[in-house]
Image (cartoon, rainbow, N blue to C red):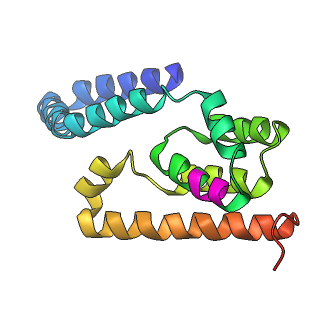
Amino acid sequence: MVALYIVAGLAVIFSFIFDREKTFKGLKMGLKKFLKILPNYLMILIIIAFVLLISEDFIIDYLTQNTIFIGMISALIIGSITMMPGFIAYPLAGILVSKGIPYMVVAAFVSSLMLVGVVTYPVEKEYMGMKATIYRNIGAFFVAGMIAIITGISYGEVII
């Protein structure tokens, strides 16, 4: 990450050396765009802070008390309103499986976590529009559900 900052800083310095006016104009435009999207990103940070209050134990207890289909629906909902990067989500999935949560429920949680973006809705709406964002999230929710059901069938947790 530090290397990226160094490269960006050097690029700004070289740009400044070659054309000060364009560099200032570019930095000013960048600052304006940053300030324009800042409220949406702050909203996402606030939502993430509240979501992080949900403990791992709560998720495990909630997902294991019910039938597999209720657990799957719960996992889809929890995954949809949670936001975390893949390098945290996949090890968490391993922990959930080791705690005895069915693969179908874990697949529902992880796939909805990666596909559905309730937390990122404000930013998506800004760039894609409200209608496209809603359609994308609804479609992603159903795709995550299908992934979970196929996983359950593959692991013999659901018999058709």
Q: Nearer the viewer, residue 13 or 113?
A: 113
Q: Nearer the viewer, residue 89 or 16?
A: 89
Give the overall secondary structure of the magenta segment: helix
Residue 18 image offset from top left, x and y in percent: 24, 30
* Residue 109 visible in the displayed image: yes
Quarter location, residue 35: top left
* Residue 87 visible in the displayed image: no
Residue 60 image offset from top left, x and y in percent: 68, 37
Instruction: Judge whether residue 73 is colored magenta.
Output: yes
Q: Residue furthest bottom?
A: 160
Question: For this view, does 4 lie left or right of residue 151?
Answer: left
Quadrant in which the C terminus is drawn: bottom right
- The residue located at (80%, 43%) in the rendering is 97
Q: Nearer the viewer, residue 121 or 23?
A: 121
- The residue located at (18%, 40%) in the rendering is 33
Residue 76 image offset from top left, x and y in percent: 56, 55
- The residue located at (58%, 27%) in the rendering is 55
Q: Nearer the viewer, residue 128 or 10?
A: 128
Instruction: Judge whether residue 151 is colored magenta.
Output: no
- The residue located at (71%, 50%) in the rendering is 106
Residue 121 image offset from top left, x and y in percent: 33, 51
Residue segment shown in magenta: 70-74
**Total marks in image:** 0
Question: For this view, does 18 lie left or right of residue 79?
Answer: left
Quarter location, residue 50: top left
Q: Residue furthest right?
A: 156
